[in-house]
Amino acid sequence: MTPNDPAAERAHPNQFALLRQRRFAPFFWTQFLGAGNDNLFKFAFTVMVTYQLQVSWLPPSLAGLAIGALFILPFLLFSATSGQLADKFDKTVLIRFVKLLEIAIMALAGWGFIAANVPVLLACVFLMGLHSTLFGPVKFAYLPQHLGERELTGGNGMVEMGTFVAILLGNVAGGLLIAIPHDGARYVAGACVALAVLGRLVAQVIPASPSTDPALRINWNPVSETWRNLRLAHENIVVFRSLLGISWMWFFGAVFLSQFPSLAKEVLHGDEQVASLLLVVFSIGIGTGSLLCEVLSKRHVEIGLVPLGAIGMSVFAIDLYFAARGLLPSASLALRDFIAQPPHWRVMADLALLSLFAGLYSVPMYALIQLRSKPTHRARIIAANNILNALFMIASSIGVGLLLSAHFTIPQVFLITGLLNAVVAFYIFMLVPEYLLRFVAFVLTRMIYRFRVRGEEHIPTQGAAILVCNHVSFVDAVLLMAASPRPIRFIMDHQIFTVPLLGTLFRLAKAIPIAPQRTDPAVYESAFEQAREVLAGGDLLCIFPEGGLTRDGQLGEFKGGVMKLLEANPVPVVPLALQNLWGSFFSRIDGAAMRRPFRRGLFSRVGLVAGRAVAPADVTPAGLRDEVGRLLAS
């Protein structure tokens, strides 16, 4: 049983069960320990130079900025190279090498802590940034190599949740250990080395992950290689715009994370423990949102969650401005006093919810990039994304600095960020309508209907195929979009494009209009020409062989369009059956559709059943009609 087999994907009931499987658990804990160690080291070092050492050339006000900049710098310098290494070599071998490197770096850092040698510790910050740079492309390229399409969202959600929990625990542990009188530095040194060694031991159990491009010749020029990777990503416009969308999420998150200390002190009038509480709330929100993705997506890569996440990010970032701007000045509040005041509950709720929606926004995007990128170039595209993330985070720091220097308040910075997020999200969704279309499908199948899919393993996750389905309502295509992990191009009656709103929706979906040959021969031939191009490109094409919406709820005669398509493109044909849509608002049960809203109430049950693919040589219109009829009755 291989990881990408349907049987392997059904071997666990949810994402947490992956923690019991060797193909995921050792990798997860290796990533968890590495992220925790990074943050334990960085935070302990920041506290040391802020409170315990007097370094004239590194004042406390610049320490956090300098440490953050040194950690990000390797992402700009070495991401392009690390992406090539991850595509060329076995990823498990690379992971083990990186964990050995971590042990060496942490041994040096341990000496730096004990000797209170700031230059050595700064060098180790840079080296740990290099460690993370090497690990990043491997991490995101490893998952699609071992998880199937139905597991990618849950696997990414687990990794995202684990990363933020590790960051939180690392910060807490670093602060507590370095604060131990007299021996704090020794405890930090021991903890850093111990976590690095433990990570290497766990990495030994990670299964082999063979090279996806062993013949690749390494280009050591980071500038030209980064540009080449971005051009590779641009070949798939959805992947490229998703890279930009993820980088924007890092911009958005960096604004809030960078301002937690100042927000706690200057706006919320709390002490250091309040700043830590904000980080805890934010981390819990991200983790919760990441874990919810699998539940809401029904274990598919559901990019319809991305617009939902973007809406929530803007709504609660803007509300945070209103919640924070009206707080009355007070003396510095301890954690207990801060929590006791009801106005602060709204602030914490806004932080938790905006970070939760950020999790809903980011996880499907990462999964989409992993699923749609060419396997031979996947790590290099992720490496290019890491560079974009670093650049967007730098831009975030500069932007926030300019706003604060122009005397904007921290709540006003949050308001501007929330409004900018709405503008950027709208721009991305107009450039890539697939996000918006999947969002509409997501809402339709969860808020209007209770939509159940059976036989979904028969819907191909790769390669060209023709889907044939009965035609019951004006939203049949939207429901099919929700059921498929891949985009579907639809051949649809040209008259449906005149329906308000739905016509716009189907034009965004690049549906192919078709008219009867006797009515408009040019439109008829153009439809088949476009359909052949879709199949030649290895994509999914859906046709409604009845030629129009049913007027009596019965399955009509299947016309010969499928046979015409198969002449030029002999691909598998997958029969589908939509159940229980007759009688809904979008069907023609009373002669005209969409006249009686909520005629069956909300959440009425509808379903889709997918049958086994039929080989092109065995396809006949009558045979397909019989199979769809059998599925309808099942």
Image (cartoon, helix red, strand yellow):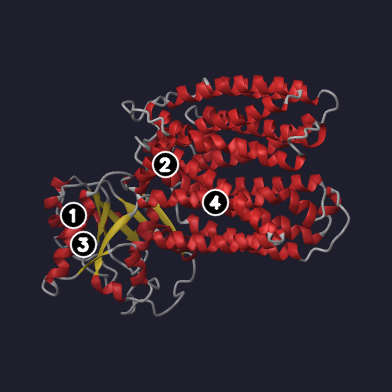
Sequence-wise, which precedes: disc 2 or disc 3? Answer: 2
Type of residue at label 4? Met
Query: Dot 2 corresponds to which residue?
Result: 370
Residue 632 disc label: none
Query: Dot 1 corresponds to which residue?
Result: 532
- Neighbourhood count class around disc 2 (C-alpha, 10 Å): few under 14, some 14–19, many 20 upward: many
- Neighbourhood count class around disc 1 (C-alpha, 10 Å): few under 14, some 14–19, many 20 upward: some
- Whether residue 515 is visible here, answered yes or no, is yes
| Disc 4/disc 3 C-alpha distance (Å) | 43 Å
Sequence-wise, which precedes: disc 4 or disc 3? Answer: 4
Sequence-wise, which precedes: disc 4 or disc 2? Answer: 4
Where does residue 254 sit, x and y in percent of width and height?
A: 61, 49
Residue sitting at 55 percent across and 23 percent down? Answer: 99
Task: Decide if residue 42 is on the left or right side of residue 552.
Answer: right
Q: Is residue 337 above or below residue 183?
A: below
Query: Dot 3 corresponds to which residue?
Result: 545
Residue toward you, 5 or 11: 5
| Disc 1/disc 4 C-alpha distance (Å) | 38 Å
- Neighbourhood count class around disc 3 (C-alpha, 10 Å): few under 14, some 14–19, many 20 upward: many
Residue sitting at 49 percent across and 24 percent down? Answer: 206
| Disc 1/disc 2 C-alpha distance (Å) | 27 Å
| The N terminus lies in quadrant | top left
The quarter holding residue 131 reads: top right
Where does residue 597 sit, x and y in percent of width and height?
A: 45, 77
